[in-house]
Image (cartoon, rainbow, N blue to C red):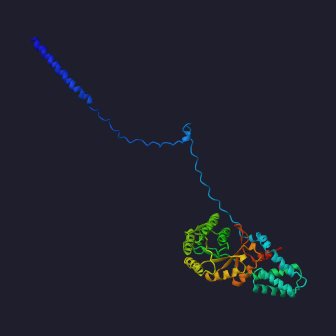
Amino acid sequence: MTEYVLIALALLGVLILGGIGLVVPRLRRRQEPPPPVDTRVPEPTAPPVEVPEGELSTGILVEPPPVVEAPAPTLEVPEPTAGRLVRLRSRLSRSQNAFGRGLLGLLSRDHLDEDAWEEIEDSLITADVGIDATREIVDRLRERTRVLGTRSATELRALLATELVTALDPGLDRSLRTTPKEGVPAVLLVVGVNGAGKTTTCGKIARVLVADGRSVTLGAADTFRAAAADQLQTWGGRVGAETVRGPEGADPASVAFDAVRRGIDAGTDTVLIDTAGRLQNKIGLMDELGKVKRVVEKHGPIDETLLVLDATTGQNGLEQARVFTEVVNVTGVVLTKLDGTAKGGIVIAVQRKLGIPVKLVGLGEGPDDLAPFEPTQFVDALLGTEPLARDA
């Protein structure tokens, strides 16, 4: 009996051990559950700082240099226009010295015969005074010297100076109309042939206006030459004047119209419009200049049309002035390069022929070498000696 019990216990032990052997491997193969997911929003971190390669070995961090803004360009202050012609007098007198001394030398002869008067006429004509004006001046001089019995050099110079000033018609209005009216700026149209220095002169006129206290908007209506718009913008930038320009080849009338509109919006005093150089025998180009005038006048009448003439062209300038006057009604002449010619009489010829006053004269290449024209000061420089003591 006891043996059966022992056998039964042995079998039971074997069964228990076998069951354990089957269960344990399965428990070992069971995968562990995945770790819980962290749902918290990570805090922002600063971006990594890039260190230049050359500094990695030393561990030294060098901060980049601070950004320094470029200083605003300093605006130029043009010289006051009052007294400019006096300051530039020496330049004019040097160029006209032979003319003035020649006339005074002829007039101071002991005996003024017909040959002497013919030489005086030739000197005036050579200086581009013009034939009609020359004959009138000489006739008046002959009469006054005969009646007054004038012989001294001082008296003769005074007589000659008086006649030249009279020929320049000092009563003509030489002021520039630059005052705005009823919220519309004054409009100045600048015209002239190629090669007269028109765009440069236009920039100098802007300086004259700024020097006289006017705010200016420039219109670069010479759209056929890209350099002209760049050049005008440079001139304007020096004195704080805005330049309105269009793409190369744009309609000049459209640019001129926009310039005036911009001047109205900005509240500037004066709009100065530079036009393309025109050859007086190119009818199509002259018609286009007339179109610029008509389009601009949709804003209001043009206050000034200034014709830029090169003094060295002499009598050819008269034909240029005549044609331009027919197209755009020129109100004043700007005579450039007067310091580079001995033919200052062209001032008289232009006014006598066309009745148009010379309002500004150029006497050098400097930015402020454009001066308001004053007949008495001009004649003083023309004759090349001290200021006159006029006879009553």
- Indicate whether 26 appears above or below 233: above
Left or right: residue 292 versus residue 355 is left
In the image, 38 versus 25, the foreground residue is 25
Q: Quadrant of the N terminus?
A: top left
Q: Quadrant of the C terminus?
A: bottom right
- Residue at (60% x, 78% y) in the render: 302
- Indicate whether 127 appears above or below 80: below
* Residue 383 visible to the viewer: no
Please identify the quarter of the rendering in which residue 135 is found.
bottom right
Residue 327 point in image, percent of width and height: 61, 82
Left or right: residue 21 versus residue 313 is left
Check the image and name the residue furthest to the right.
Answer: 110
Left or right: residue 101 versus residue 329 is right
In the image, 214 versus 21, the foreground residue is 21
Left or right: residue 1 versus residue 36 is left
In the image, 1 versus 307, the foreground residue is 1
- Residue at (10% x, 14% y) in the render: 4
Residue 177 point in image, percent of width and height: 65, 76
- Residue at (75% x, 83% y) in the render: 130
